[in-house]
Image (spheres, rainbow, N blue to C red):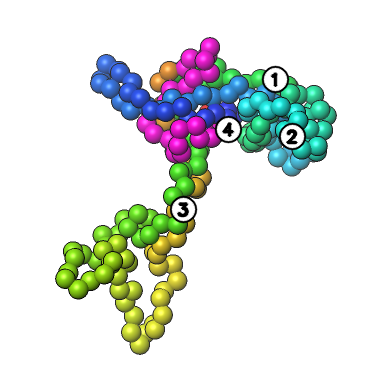
Amino acid sequence: MLGLIGRKVGMTSFFTPEGDIACTIIEAGPCPIVNIRTQERDGYIALQLGYGSVKPKHLRKPLSGYFKKQGVEPVRLLKEFRLSEPGDFQIGQVLDVRLFGEGDVVSIAGWTKGRGFAGVVKRHGFAGVGGRTHGQHNRERHPGSMGSNTFPGRVWKGKRLAGRYGNERVTVENLSVLKVIPEKNILVVSGAVPGPRGGLLLIYK
């Protein structure tokens, strides 16, 4: 699945003859090929793509030496895209948004917004324990009774409780490419994708 690395710019409306639909604007690429994984040497076939520019002085020595060995300009981020079969690619070749065309169907992976440690109402959509009474104190958003008496005498494993919420990798499949703007490296896709504005995205063809 060939693809590109990009970032989420924001959402807007896209007008079609059938009406307006919600869409996401993505800045995709350009992504230089930093390395090529082969079946004989690595046991799988993949392209290692880079994204974003970075000053060499901000790199650690091993990574700086790696880019120098590959003969490519340093990049801020490296990601691999698995391929089913080797293609006609060269190290240093740059892939850009022209990889996609209007009408293509793509899958986009991103990282959801991190919510930190969240309670059961925010994390799982619990309703809380009902309205206020004259004698209660701070229990509207509590999980309520966990139910158990002699048996099992404990809380079952896997019960939905408070905890860390968000900051998970999520993939949204079957999004249509509505528009491609090569001169600005812009990709417009239907629907929403995970993550905040400026968040990292992996776009799979």
Residue 116 badge: 3
| Mark 4 or mark 1: whose residue is earlier in sequence | 4
Residue at 43% x, 35% y: name it: 193
What is the three-letter code of the residue carrying label 2?
Leu
What is the three-letter code of the residue carrying label 4?
Met
Residue 129 lies, in percent from the top left, at 24, 66
Disc 1/disc 3 C-alpha distance (Å): 40 Å
| Mark 1 or mark 3: whose residue is earlier in sequence | 1
Residue 1 badge: 4
Q: Quadrant of residue 97?
A: top right
**Foreground tag (3 vs 4):** 3
The residue segment tinted magenta is 180-203
Residue 201 horizontal side relative to residue 86, left or right: left
Disc 3/disc 4 C-alpha distance (Å): 33 Å
For label 3, count other residues whose C-alpha is less than 10 Å away and answer few (under 14), some (14-19) or many (20+): few
Residue 177 lies, in percent from the top left, at 43, 23
Q: Is residue 66 visible?
A: no
Disc 2/disc 4 C-alpha distance (Å): 29 Å
Q: Are marks 4 and 1 in contact (CB under 8 Å)?
A: no
Residue at 45% x, 71% y: name it: 157
Disc 2/disc 3 C-alpha distance (Å): 30 Å
Determine the secondary structure under disc 1: loop
Q: Are marks 2 and 1 in contact (CB under 8 Å)?
A: no
What is the three-letter code of the residue carrying label 1?
Gln
Q: Quadrant of residue 35?
A: top right
| Mark 2 or mark 1: whose residue is earlier in sequence | 2
